[in-house]
Image (cartoon, helix red, strand yellow):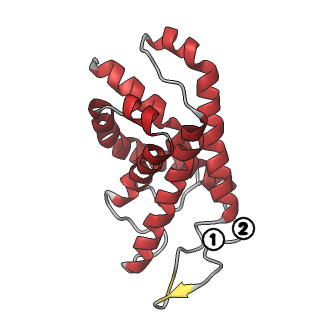
Amino acid sequence: MSLYATVVTAMWVMLPAYVPNNAAVLAGGGAPLDGGRTWGGRRILGDGKTYRGTLFGVLAGFAVAAALDVLQRAAISAFGVSLPWFPFAAMGALPAGAMLGDILASFVKRRTGRERGASFPLLDQLDFVVVALAVTAVAAPAWFGDTFTLDVLLAILVLTPLLHLLTNAIAYQFGLKDEPW
């Protein structure tokens, strides 16, 4: 697969995992997942992880995957790359895994004494990717194996931190985030 095809495929298959955290920010607020509880004197997750944001993020990622399935043939023509469709299990696993990864990262941040919004390099950029991939590998193993080839996985691991920093900087500029990372 050419570098161009690899990058296009990587971005295509990860869009349902890239969208949820950004969508959750737009829908944020409401009751926190941890109910305000603490563990070891620190919040378990913090106010930034809410039921509404989590649900909205998963639904937004699912909707993106469904839309990509509708657009697949046109996208293949437009990009000149054979792009995969998303089976139902992957439509749910990618965004749910992304949200779970972000929740787990918040848990790790609280356990290591970091406050909400504090930077944690690499964890901030790859938490949602690693868990989204793991959940998808379990939920749709055949599709995962066919889709996430080594070159696509490497492209995802290289491009995601760059895209994450860029989108967060944009969200910060628009006042949607309190920090640019």
**Above or below, 149 relative to 106:** above
Q: Residue at x 60, y 72 (%)?
A: 47
Q: Amino acid at mark 2?
A: Gly
Residue 136 visible at all: yes
Residue type, numbered disc 1:
Leu
* Residue where numbered disc 1 is placed: 33
- Direction from residue 60 to residue 93 in the image, left or right: left
Q: Residues within 10 Å of mark 2 (few under 14, many from 20)?
A: few
Is residue 172 something one can see in this rendering? no
* Viewer-nearest residue: 78 or 176: 78
The residues tagged by marks 1 and 2 sit, at their Cα atoms, a distance apart of: 9 Å
Percent x, y of residue 176: 59, 54
Find residue 161 and report its horizontal and vertical position in percent: 35, 46
How dense is the environment of label 1, judged by Cα within 10 Å: few (below 14), some, or many (20 and up)? some
Looking at the image, is 11 positioned above or below residue 134? above
Point out which mark residue 30 bears: 2
Question: With respect to residue 140, does 12 lie above or below?
Answer: above
- Most extreme residue toward the bottom is 41
Identify the residue shown where x is 57% and y is 32%.
87
Quarter of the view holding residue 80: top left
Q: Which label was assigned to residue 158? A: none
Q: Position of residue 89 (x, y in %)?
A: 57, 40
Q: Nearer the viewer, residue 145 or 167?
A: 145
SS at mark 2? loop
Seen in the picture, residue 147 relative to 110 is either above or below; the reply is: above
- Residue 173's spot in the image, x, y percent? 52, 49
